[in-house]
Image (cartoon, grey):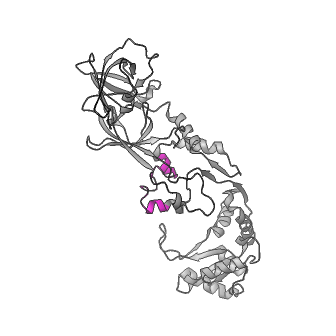
Amino acid sequence: MEMAEKLIREGKAYVDDTPREQMQKERMDGIESRCRNNSVEENLKLWKEMIAGTERGLKCCIRGKLDMQDPNKSLRDPVYYRCNPMAHHRIGDKYKVYPTYDFACPYVDAREGITHALRSSEYHDRNAQYFRIQKDMGIRKVNIYEFSRLNMVYTLLSKRKLLWFVQNGKVDGWDDPRFPTVQGIVRRGLKIEALIQFIVEQGASKNLNLMEWDKLWTINKKIIDPVCPRHTAVVAERRVLLTLTDGPEKPFVRIIPRHKKYEGAGEKSTTYTNKIWIDYADAEVLSAGQEVTLMDWGNAIVKEIVKDQNGTITQLTGVLHLEGSVKTTKWKLTWLPNIDDLVNLTLVEFDYLITKKKLEEGEDFIDVVNPCTKKEIAAYGDSNMRNLQRGEILQLERKGYFRCDVPFVRPSKPLVLFAIPDGRQQK
């Protein structure tokens, strides 16, 4: 505020009460405001009205007296200060006037000892304004280093556009896993160290780039895969019961590692029974007489495939062949024991919010909003998943990586897992 008053006294700024729409038109047309040549006394009088937030003051703003004919329109007497009578979230109604970015940035950067202001290239046309304001203020010049803005495919980064999704109930909030906010992608399962590594690899390039998400998720996979625990899930829809005629009549439990190559992941208990559940997608590819591997158990031979009148597989029969070699089997099947302790799961997959890689100039994003961006799949998980904590990352064997968003509360309420892209999945 002292600097604003100093510029008024030196004739480098003036108070203007021109209506906003008229002011914008005059700036576009290079027409000087009728207030431009007000006396210093008149400007200081109106400035006090602004500070007090009076009815007269609320109609005014402070503008820099630069050059209304400059081809660079940012130099055509930009606004330095505006009135805002709304209470501030930190300091209440202590002030009625607030500086604009155009005024505050060059001043604060110089005062705080900044040597290089790093700015995205979209502000290039305002660089001349930044330097001119520092010169008028009589303060140290700060160097500007520009870099290109990072753009991602199928992604909107404008907060105004993202707000539309929030307000229209298309997402759950600013931390929705479909959002490109840090909260959003972390909730989807991205590790902060992966984000840092990705940004460092990009460097401060000045070239405009449109990045694929795959690279970021590939980096993330390399971080989570060596340490995240392994669990098993079977999709609920049309799951098939495989009866092992020579299987253990009395269920027994083994304690096995949650990650075979990482001891820090801990252990889990696996129950072995003579009736086990497998995915329908796995049952479809099997044929009678075929030898398969039951993961974390051993081999078995399919003896009978029972189908209903529509050709849908309803049950399987087989025998164990634990001495068989896992190297010779084509199918390695995940399975769950037929016990009451299985956990209800909801597996959630997400897609991009828009259906176009890059919006063209002037194109309305609402025209390319993706109508279906969330898919929920009911499944069952092994009993160890009751102990998962919110935010914990795991791998479901043969199904991919997931982040626990809603942990186990009670048997009737499903545990919610968000699918984490691994860099290979193409939507």
Q: Residue at x 34, y 40 (%)?
A: 345
Q: Residue at x 61, y 52 (%)?
A: 151
Q: Quadrant of the image for the N terminus?
A: bottom right
Identify the image quadrant of residue 219: top right
Q: Is residue 390 left or right of residue 274?
A: right
**Residue 64 shows up from this direction:** no
Q: Nearer the viewer, residue 267 or 209?
A: 209
x then y, percent, for residue 174 = 46, 56
Could one spot residue 85 in this view of the protein? yes
The region drawn magenta spans: 163-186
Count of numbered circles in the view:
0
Does the segment drawn in magenta span residue 170? yes
Give the percent coordinates (x, y) of residue 108: 65, 64
**Residue lying furthest front:** 309
Is 153 in the magenta?
no
Where residue 253 sits in the image (x, y, percent)? 29, 22
Eyeballing the image, is 359 above or below 328? Answer: below
Vertical placement of residue 272 versus 407, above or below: above
Q: Residue at x 56, y 63 (%)?
A: 364
Q: In the rendering, at what x and y percent does residue 125 appear?
A: 72, 65
Examine the image and state in which quarter residue 3 appears.
bottom right
Residue drawn at x 48%, y 48% as measured from the top left: 351
